[in-house]
Amino acid sequence: MSTDDIDDSSAPLMEHLKELRDRILISLAAFVVGILIAFSVWSPIFNFLTNPICAALEGRGQECQLVLIKLQEGFFVAFRISVMGGFILAFPIIAWQLWRFVAPGLYKSEKGAFLPFLLSSPLMFAVGAAFAFYVVLPIAFNFFLGFQQMMVTDPEAGPDLVTAEPGMAGILFQGSMEQYLSLTTNFILAFGLCFQLPVLLTLMGKAGLISAQGLIGMRRYAIVLILILAAVVTPPDMMSQLILFLAIYPLYEVSIFLIRRIEKRREADLRAQGLWVDPDEDEAEKGGA
């Protein structure tokens, strides 16, 4: 191979690297712009995220009030919200840049598998996040707040003075702004990722890595794993663990249904081309041989 041949073969690689650099820069620019936009409205976003704890406190007749433990805590909360919000705002641009980079190198069948994954993944994450925010968090916060020992007003000392009930130490929730945001976003992230299960399994099924029959055979192990996951990511109360299990396990069954449809469509295409081989007959022939 001559030097000219080597230079010619390296040219496409350099072009791909240049394209990758450009698309990364566009994605980073979109991310930075998203951060700046989110930072300008971080306070309304944080107030929205406090709705579950405020509702739980108001149901107990308490004021909704969080505290700053550290001087810089408020800034870090604003920055964390800005980063999360910036990624959400920039995600369509990032996903489009990713698709434009990988699509030219994919076969038609591979595009048919990757594009639905790229579209359905954020949708299922949003569904999981909404489920955590509107269903799981209120249950979790009510459970945690149940460990308070409420203070009562002392009428003899004055209407503004509160004290613990006789024989009880007063235990009242005074949540840290940063810790609350961390707990809430961890719940949202965990449920959003859990709801990726049907997307991931369906993609693997379309790639031929797993089958519907294999998932059916693994059903009992899947139930145990989902129960363990529910115990890890939820508060230690049976109600929230049961809710997570009832949300995740049907997604496993949905994955089996979707993969079975993919397999039937693949079988029909192969039969139309005369390329289909029945697995049972193939195994029988091998056994006879």
Image (spheres, helix red, strand yellow):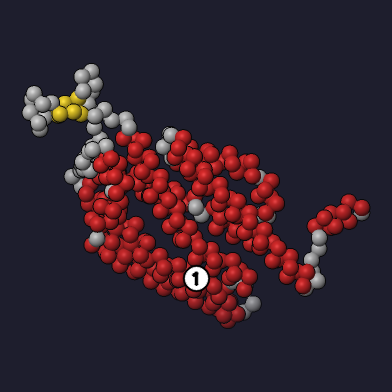
| Image vertical order of residue 8 relative to residue 217, above or below | below
Foreground pick, 72 / 139: 139
Residue at 92% x, 52% y: name it.
Answer: 288
User: What residue does disc 1 label?
Assistant: 99
Pointer 1 local density, CA inside 10 Å: few below 14, some 14–19, many at least 20: some
- Can residue 3 be seen here? The reply is no
Instruction: State which quadrant residue 81 falls in.
Output: bottom left
| Image vertical order of residue 125 relative to residue 246, above or below | below
Left or right, 99 with respect to 274, comes to left
Which amino acid type is marked by label 1? Trp
| Image vertical order of residue 217 relative to residue 271, above or below | above
Left or right, 83 with respect to 281, comes to left
| Image vertical order of residue 157 relative to residue 115, above or below | above
Q: Determine whether the residue tagged by mark 1 lies in a helix, strand or loop.
A: helix
Q: How far from the left and from the top, in percent, is residue 207?
A: 64, 61
Task: Tell me the quarter of the image containing the N terminus.
Answer: bottom right
Q: How far from the left and from the top, in percent, is residue 155?
A: 10, 26
Foreground pick, 7 / 76: 76
Residue at 55% x, 75% y: name it.
Answer: 104
Residue at 60% x, 80% y: name it.
Answer: 5
- Can residue 162 be seen here? The reply is yes
Q: How far from the left and from the top, in percent, is residue 216?
A: 67, 48
Left or right, 247 with respect to 148, comes to right
Residue at 28% x, 30% y: name it.
Answer: 148
